[in-house]
Image (tube, helix red, strand yellow):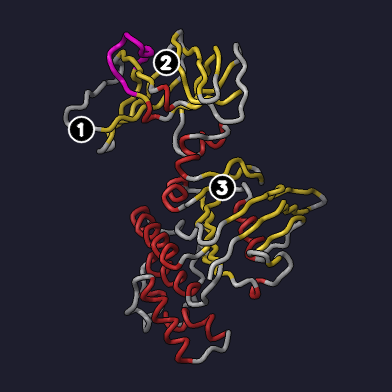
């Protein structure tokens, strides 16, 4: 049975040579039962340290951790009823796959018939019911990662914790394993916390994403919410690709901001609870797919194509604007799609409702 998780003002300070480093800084978060939440951010942002505190591998400097109403902050790892999947699989090379998966249930001194049942069920769950007699070195990287997951599932944890579990796999295997992890998590209704620096992984797996930077939480939202409504420039730049342009505010309402951009006026989206001041500069977050290229003129912004890249399903362009700024444009490719060449003068067509205004 899964549990909800409450993280209350959690802080971790490391001390080295009398210098203090605040790896996690006053993180407050609630995770619902059966929810898959990813911790996303660059290396050193604190996401792994946060996960290790939830697991019990690190002791918080301050704050509390609760599984439902149970305070587990000072409880040993083996008493928290968690499963932890590591980046490097951590399989025992001298043991068969059966014995690897059976290791946890045997440590709990369960009956052999019960162990057999748990191992068979877990191997079937990860799609490898016939490999019990093999050894880890006889399996591919993707299969070894599935066995690492099966070993955790055989323990019947209330919480599943995963730390960059797919980072050692090639791109195709990562995609396959993302699908498998999500399928298994949904099937079992497990509460899952998943650490990654890969934004595609976070977007495809998560019910919600926690974006971290320098030990603090920048924003928590659904994948759709983060991508469409980034609360900070850091989030806008880290989630997907973003062009950031500078406009001047004319006026604003609760839902939109009217801005001047390259001598044209656009009504773009406003963020909730933000006050925009007329005459002030504002950052405009423009996703590459919200732009189109066409002939110069009309409501378009004049630009010049510097680079064109064809990647099969889409065309990608680097285009300079009147102020010399370079923007990235992506257009879906079909046989009748106009193709622009380096040096072409083009008009950049802006989809104003897709643009988000962030105060400077």
* Residue segment shown in magenta: 292-304
Magenta highlight on residue 208: no
Farthest residue, direction left: 335
Q: Nearer the viewer, residue 169 or 246?
A: 246
Q: Where does label 2 land, which residue?
A: 321
Dividing the picture into quadrants, the one containing residue 136 is bottom left
Q: Where does label 3 land, which residue?
A: 210
Q: Residue at x 54, y 72 (%)?
A: 157
Q: CA distance from mark 2 to mark 1?
A: 26 Å
Q: Where does label 1 land, which residue?
A: 334
Label 1 secondary element: loop
Label 2 secondary element: loop
Magenta highlight on residue 302: yes
Q: CA distance from mark 3 to mark 2?
A: 34 Å
- Please state the horizontal and vertical placement of residue 295, each as a whole percent of the image: 27, 13
Q: Is residue 116 left or right of residue 47?
A: left
């Amino acid at each position: 049975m899964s549990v909800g998780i409450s993280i209350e003002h959690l802080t971790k300070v490391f001390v080295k040579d009398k210098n203090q480093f605040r790896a996690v800084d006053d993180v407050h978060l609630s995770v619902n039962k059966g929810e898959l939440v990813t911790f996303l951010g660059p290396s050193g942002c604190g996401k792994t340290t946060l996960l290790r505190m939830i697991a019990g591998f690190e002791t918080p400097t301050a704050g509390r951790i609760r599984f439902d109403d149970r305070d587990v902050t000072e409880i040993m790892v083996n008493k928290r009823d968690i499963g932890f999947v590591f980046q490097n699989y951590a399989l025992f090379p001298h043991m068969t796959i059966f014995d690897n998966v059976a290791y946890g249930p045997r440590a709990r001194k369960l009956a052999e018939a019960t162990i057999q049942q748990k191992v068979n069920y877990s191997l079937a769950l990860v799609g490898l019911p016939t490999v019990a007699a093999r050894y880890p070195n006889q399996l591919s990287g993707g299969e070894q990662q599935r066995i690492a997951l099966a070993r955790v599932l055989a323990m019947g944890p209330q919480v599943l914790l995963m730390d960059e579990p797919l980072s050692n796999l090639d791109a195709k295997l990562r995609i396959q394993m993302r699908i498998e992890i999500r399928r298994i998590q949904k099937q079992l209704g497990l509460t899952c916390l998943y650490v990654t620096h890969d934004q595609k992984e976070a977007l495809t797996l998560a019910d919600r994403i926690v974006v971290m930077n320098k030990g603090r939480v920048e924003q928590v939202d659904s994948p759709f919410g983060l991508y469409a409504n980034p609360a900070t420039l850091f989030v806008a730049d880290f989630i997907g690709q973003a062009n950031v342009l500078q406009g001047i505010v004319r006026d604003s309402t609760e839902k939109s901001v009217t801005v001047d951009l390259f001598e044209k006026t656009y009504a773009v989206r406003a963020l909730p609870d933000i006050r925009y001041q007329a005459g002030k500069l504002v950052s405009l977050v423009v996703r590459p797919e919200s732009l189109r290229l066409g002939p110069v003129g009309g409501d378009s912004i004049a630009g010049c194509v510097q680079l064109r890249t064809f990647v099969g399903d889409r065309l990608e362009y680097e285009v300079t604007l009147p102020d010399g700024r370079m923007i990235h444009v992506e257009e879906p490719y079909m046989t009748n799609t106009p193709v622009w060449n380096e040096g072409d003068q083009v008009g950049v067509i802006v989809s104003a409702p897709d643009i988000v205004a962030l105060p400077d």
